[in-house]
Amino acid sequence: MTTPMSTRAPAGGVSDDPLAVAADAENAAIFTYGVITAFVAAARRRTVAENAAEHRARRDEIDRAIVAAGDTPPLPAAGYTLPVEVTGPESAARAALAAEEDCARAYRALLEKAGNETGRRIGVDGLTESAVRAAGWRAALRETPVTVAFPGSPVDG
């Protein structure tokens, strides 16, 4: 799991709002992709850039939904501690996979707790996108199976 390097609380304090948790997961994924860019093979840099852009777009959508609900989106942490030390292409792929699994768990929780259509739509779209990207990283790592039966559940990784 990717965790903030500081112990500061999100902008509005510790949140159990599933949208804010998903935004935090997206912020961590964006950070992760920024770090791994320096370590992936040249052939994967485009994938990394595309994945990072997808996470930024999803985070921005979540932030808009939070603002529309009258709340303040969480600020990204100054830095995050990655679940693996990134030293080369393989560990970079493992860090990316971990970020996608973290996002999938956040979106699954959002789906379970969403009280409106917007939250459910964001949850389904985010879970689907994270599961597809995670499958791509598992394939790159030559893990089998490349997909999991229930993305985002505690048993997915």
Image (spheres, rainbow, N blue to C red):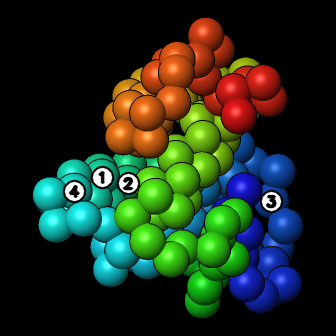
Q: Which residue is drawn at 66% across and 41% down?
A: 106
Q: In this view, does 142 lie above or below 87?
A: above
Q: Is mark 4 on a helix, strand or loop?
A: helix
Please name the residue that numbered disc 2 is placed on: 55
Q: Of the residues shown, which amino acid type is indicated by label 4?
A: Arg
Image quadrant of residue 76?
bottom right
Q: How far apart are marks 2 and 3 (CA)?
A: 20 Å
Image quadrant of residue 46?
bottom left
Quadrant placement of the C terminus: top right
Can I make out residue 136 in this image? yes
- Tell whether label 2 touches label 4 (CB within 8 Å): no
Image quadrant of residue 149?
top right
Q: Of the residues shown, which amino acid type is indicated by label 2?
A: His
- Residue 33 at what x, y percent from top left? 40, 66
Q: Of the residues shown, which amino acid type is indicated by label 1?
A: Asn
Q: How far apart are marks 1 and 4 (CA)?
A: 11 Å
Q: Is mark 3 on a helix, strand or loop?
A: loop
Can I make out residue 31 in this image? no
Please name the residue that numbered disc 1 is placed on: 51
Q: How far apart are marks 3 and 1 (CA)?
A: 26 Å
Quadrant placement of the N terminus: bottom right
- Residue 59 at what x, y percent from top left? 43, 56
Please name the residue that numbered disc 4 is placed on: 44
Please name the residue that numbered disc 3 is placed on: 15
Q: Which of marks 4 and 3 is in front?
A: 4
Of callouts 4 and 2, the N-terminal one = 4
Of callouts 4 and 3, the N-terminal one = 3
Q: How far apart are marks 4 and 3 (CA)?
A: 35 Å
Of callouts 3 and 1, the N-terminal one = 3
Q: Distance between the residues labelled 4 and 2?
A: 17 Å
